[in-house]
Image: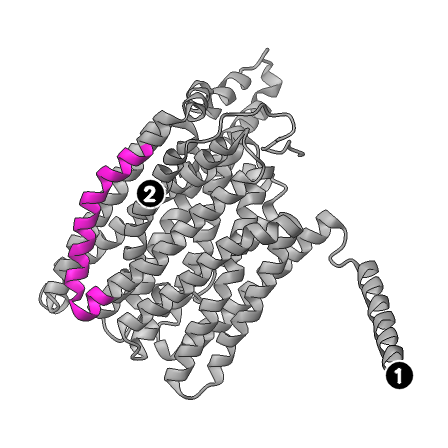
């Protein structure tokens, strides 16, 4: 089904330019929200490997539970965000996220303070681990609601009626903030852990979450109250009938005949299943023309080739100090920040579709270094090759991420935007959960090379799928006629140069 582009800059009426202080408030609130999440993302693997040494099991179980919650509830979260007012989503997001990190920090502190708990009181140990996992999962779900609200909704609404490049710039800045948090939060956490303790790190996270929630709410409410377009869109959303109401009104029969009773009952059951929030959300997602780029992006989450829990725990097992891992993760994020600066420049020359194509294969090329590390016998050198390959590949990864997000913003209609965002996050978490599932099956750090190969194959499939999408849209991948002209020009230039030198 064809859809009209979301942004029509030719027909939209010009809007007043956005006040610079309000965009700074938006970025500041986003920074505070992402900082706490990034501290937890980095530290949780180190907590788990210290609570249960010499095994990736706890880290893998946590990863499975966290991503399973997003995979299962992601589309539903997207529908809830679409149906609730902006202010209600904002309050639920900030309170739930920060409260979850406070609880998780407290339970981790208890597990670290009593290291013999798993042998002296198995019930208490299991309970604390369970609370930690549930708190982390709830925190991730609330973060997802905030991501959909800010990145898929507010940024698009704020850029409507503005210059065509504003959406690209705001997307880049939002992603840059996230990557800056990935740069500095692990470094700060790594130094706290290395020169303080894991318990100090857990308490820092809990205290920071308690303080930052108030600042985040003030920043975002200032943006909402200062930009009339957000209030207008919020009013349109709250007045929109829910899908259940539409289904109910459309399912009332005009007449009734006994012969059609059984058929009507079957149809009614099918309609009820189709209108379930989870099912209807996936139907909307797979109906989009950008479904292949979405799947290609999700495949990049079936990987251990990132500074996530499994790779961090493995590097710790290899003897790499926590502050070194934090610095390496910071370097990786720095390259990611560079990607947000390169993306608008590259986008201005070859546009969104081809930017995604070039960036997906550039990531693939850099990850060859990780594959090569498998055959290096010196474990320390292999670990540094692994970190180097992952870090350099972030340039292509984050440009590809931005390219796919912008295609979804441009091609997905306003009514489906939040639902598609939730389904996309769900699909990504499903693949990420499968990666952690492989970590449970292959839990010995000595066998990490098997996970590296599986991850590389997933990246290869991702790049191939996106290449297929580009070919379907453009009907070609390379301008062969331009290559012929370039080759002809090179031959002529070489001939002229040779003749001039022999005159």
Residue marked by disc 1: 502
x%, y% of residue 313? 31, 70
x%, y% of residue 403? 56, 50
Question: In which quadrant of the rendered image does the N terminus lie?
Answer: top right
Q: Tell whether 217 sits left or right of 273.
A: left
Q: Tell whether 158 sits left or right of 411.
A: left
Magenta: predominant secondary structure element? helix
Question: In which quadrant of the rendered image does the C terminus lie?
Answer: bottom right
Q: How is the image coloured?
A: one colour
Q: Is residue 64 above or below residue 219?
A: below
Pick the front one: 251 or 211: 211
Q: Tell whether 402 sits left or right of 470.
A: left
Q: Which mark is residue 65?
A: none
SS assignment at label 1: loop
x%, y% of residue 217? 27, 35
Circle 1: is it few (<14), some (14-19), or many (20+) Cα within 10 Å? few
User: Which residues fall within the magenta stretch?
Assistant: 191-220
Q: Earlier in the sequence, mark 1 or mark 2?
A: 2
Residue ranking furthest to the top: 255
Residue appearing at x 68%, y 55% in the figure: 468
Residue appearing at x 84%, y 59% in the figure: 481
Is 219 in the magenta? yes
Q: Is residue 440 in sight in this rendering?
A: no
Task: Count up the numbered dots.
Answer: 2
Q: Is residue 420 above or below residue 64?
A: above
Residue ranking furthest to the front: 503
As measured in the structure, the alpha-carbon distance from the residue carrying label 1 to the one carrying label 2 is 65 Å
Residue marked by disc 2: 28
């Amino acid at each position: 089904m064809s859809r009209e582009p979301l942004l029509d800059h030719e027909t939209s009426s010009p809007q007043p330019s956005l006040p610079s202080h309000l965009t700074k408030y938006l970025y500041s609130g986003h920074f505070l929200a992402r900082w706490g999440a990034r501290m937890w993302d980095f530290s949780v693997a180190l907590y788990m490997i210290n609570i249960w040494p010499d095994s990736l099991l706890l880290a893998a179980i946590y990863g499975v539970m966290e991503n399973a919650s997003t995979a299962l509830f992601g589309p539903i979260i997207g529908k809830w965000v679409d149906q609730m007012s902006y202010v209600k989503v904002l309050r639920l997001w900030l309170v739930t996220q920060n409260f979850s990190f406070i609880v998780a920090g407290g339970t981790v502190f208890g597990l670290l303070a009593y290291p013999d708990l798993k042998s002296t009181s198995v019930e208490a140990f299991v309970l604390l681990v369970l609370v930690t996992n549930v708190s982390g999962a709830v925190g991730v779900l609330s973060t997802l609601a905030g991501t959909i609200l800010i990145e898929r909704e507010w940024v698009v609404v704020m850029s409507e009626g503005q210059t065509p490049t504003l959406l690209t710039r705001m997307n880049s800045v939002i992603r840059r903030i996230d990557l800056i948090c990935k740069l500095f939060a692990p470094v700060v956490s790594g130094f706290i852990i290395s020169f303080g303790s894991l318990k100090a790190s857990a308490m820092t996270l809990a205290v920071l979450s308690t303080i930052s929630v108030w600042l985040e709410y003030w920043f975002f409410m200032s943006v909402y109250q200062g930009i009339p377009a957000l209030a207008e869109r919020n009013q349109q959303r709250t007045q929109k009938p829910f899908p259940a109401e539409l289904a109910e009104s459309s399912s009332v029969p005009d007449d009734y005949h006994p012969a059609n009773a059984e058929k009507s009952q079957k149809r009614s059951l099918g309609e009820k299943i189709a209108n379930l929030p989870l099912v209807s959300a996936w139907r909307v997602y797979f109906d989009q023309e950008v479904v292949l780029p979405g799947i290609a992006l999700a495949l990049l989450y079936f990987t251990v080739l990132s500074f996530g829990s499994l790779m961090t725990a493995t590097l710790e097992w290899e003897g790499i100090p926590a502050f070194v891992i934090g610095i390496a993760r910071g370097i990786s994020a720095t390259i990611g920040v560079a990607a947000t600066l390169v993306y608008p420049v590259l986008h201005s020359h070859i546009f969104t579709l081809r930017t995604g194509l070039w960036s997906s294969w550039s990531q693939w090329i850099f990850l060859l270094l990780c594959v090569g590390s498998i055959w290096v016998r010196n474990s320390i050198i292999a670990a540094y090759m692994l970190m180097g390959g992952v870090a350099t590949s972030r340039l292509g990864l984050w440009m590809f991420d931005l390219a796919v997000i912008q295609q979804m913003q441009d091609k997905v209609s306003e009514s489906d935007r939040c639902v598609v965002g939730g389904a996309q996050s769900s699909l990504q978490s499903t693949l990420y959960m499968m990666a952690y599932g492989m970590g449970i099956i292959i839990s010995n750090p000595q066998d990490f090379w098997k996970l590296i190969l599986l991850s590389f194959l997933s990246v290869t499939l991702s790049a191939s799928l996106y290449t297929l999408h580009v070919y379907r849209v453009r009907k070609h991948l390379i301008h062969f006629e331009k290559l012929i002209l370039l080759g002809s020009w090179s031959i002529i230039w070489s001939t002229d140069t040779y003749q001039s030198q022999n005159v």
